[in-house]
Image (cartoon, rainbow, N blue to C red):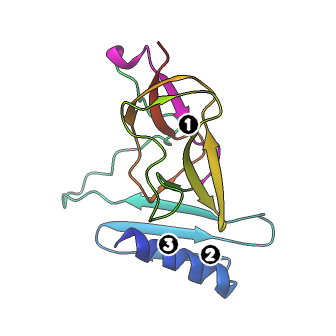
C-alpha cells in the first residue's frame, strides 16, 4: 500500500463520519480512529513482519523512545517533531528544499513543514548549527516527538 493510498484512506474515513476503521493486508495493518471525543484523528500504522513464522512480532518502541543517537552522534542535537502529521521538506512541490545536509541554520530558520489536519505548520529551528542528517523521508507521516534532524551545534 502506497503512502498516497493511506492518506486518501484517512481523508475518506474522516469525511465518512466513521469512528473507527481497521484494514489488514499481507504486509500492513492500519487502524484509523476518529470521533467527537477527540479534537482530531489518531492514526496507527504497523508494518507486519515479512517472514512467515509462528513467532510473535517483536515489540516496537514509539518513535519518540527509539534510540537515535550512536556514540559518534551523541554530540549532535536532535530536532524532534512538535506535532503529528505529514513531513515535507519543501513549502510546495515547485519550491526548493528548506534545508539539506550541510546547510548552516540559525535559531528561527524554517527546517520543514508538517501538515496536520490540512494546516501546514512551519517547524523552526530552536538551535544554531549545521544539518548533519535528515532522519525522515519527504511526504512521510511523523509522530509527536519523532526525531527529524541531527544538528551539529559547533
- Residue situated furthest bottom in the rendering: 16
Q: Position of residue 22 (x, y in %)?
A: 51, 75
Query: Magenta residues?
Result: 71-85
Query: What residue is shown at x 77% (from left), y 64% (from top)?
Result: 38
Mark 3 residue crowding within 10 angstroms, few (<14) / some (14–19) / many (20+): few
Residues 15 and 135: in front is 135
Sequence-wise, the earlier of marks 2 and 1 is 2
Sequence-wise, the earlier of marks 1 and 3 is 3
User: What residue would you read off at disc 1?
Assistant: 80
Instruction: Say which element carries label 3.
Output: helix
Query: What residue is shown at x 59% (from left), y 24% (from top)?
Result: 127
Query: What residue is shown at x 61% (from left), y 53% (from top)?
Result: 84
Q: Position of residue 24 (x, y in %)?
A: 40, 74
- Quarter in which the N terminus is drawn: bottom left
User: What residue would you read off at disc 2?
Assistant: 20
Q: Position of residue 30 (x, y in %)?
A: 46, 68
The Cα atoms of the two marked residues, 2 and 1, are separated by 28 Å
- The label shown at residue 7 is 3
Q: How many marks?
A: 3
Foreground tag (3 vs 2): 3
Whether residue 28 is in magenta: the answer is no
- The label shown at residue 91 is none
- On the picture, is 105 further left or further right than 38? left
The Cα atoms of the two marked residues, 3 and 2, are separated by 15 Å
Foreground tag (2 vs 1): 1
- On the picture, is 133 further left or further right than 107? left
Amino acid at each position: 500500500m502506497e503512502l498516497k493510498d493511506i492518506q486518501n484512506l484517512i481523508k475518506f474515513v474522516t469525511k465518512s463520519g466513521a469512528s473507527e476503521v481497521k484494514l489488514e493486508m499481507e504486509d500492513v495493518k492500519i487502524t484509523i480512529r476518529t470521533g467527537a471525543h477527540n479534537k482530531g484523528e489518531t492514526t496507527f500504522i504497523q508494518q507486519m513482519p515479512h517472514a512467515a513464522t509462528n513467532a510473535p512480532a517483536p515489540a516496537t518502541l514509539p518513535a519518540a523512545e527509539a534510540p537515535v543517537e550512536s556514540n559518534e552522534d551523541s554530540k549532535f542535537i536532535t530536532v524532534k517533531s512538535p506535532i503529528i502529521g505529514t513531513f515535507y521538506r519543501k513549502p510546495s512541490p515547485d519550491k526548493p528544499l528548506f534545508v539539506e545536509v550541510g546547510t548552516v541554520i540559525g535559531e528561527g530558520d524554517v527546517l520543514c513543514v508538517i501538515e496536520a489536519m490540512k494546516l501546514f505548520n512551519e517547524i523552526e529551528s530552536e538551535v544554531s548549527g549545521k544539518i548533519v542528517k535528515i532522519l525522515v523521508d519527504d511526504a512521510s507521516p511523523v509522530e509527536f516527538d519523532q526525531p527529524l534532524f541531527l544538528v551539529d551545534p559547533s
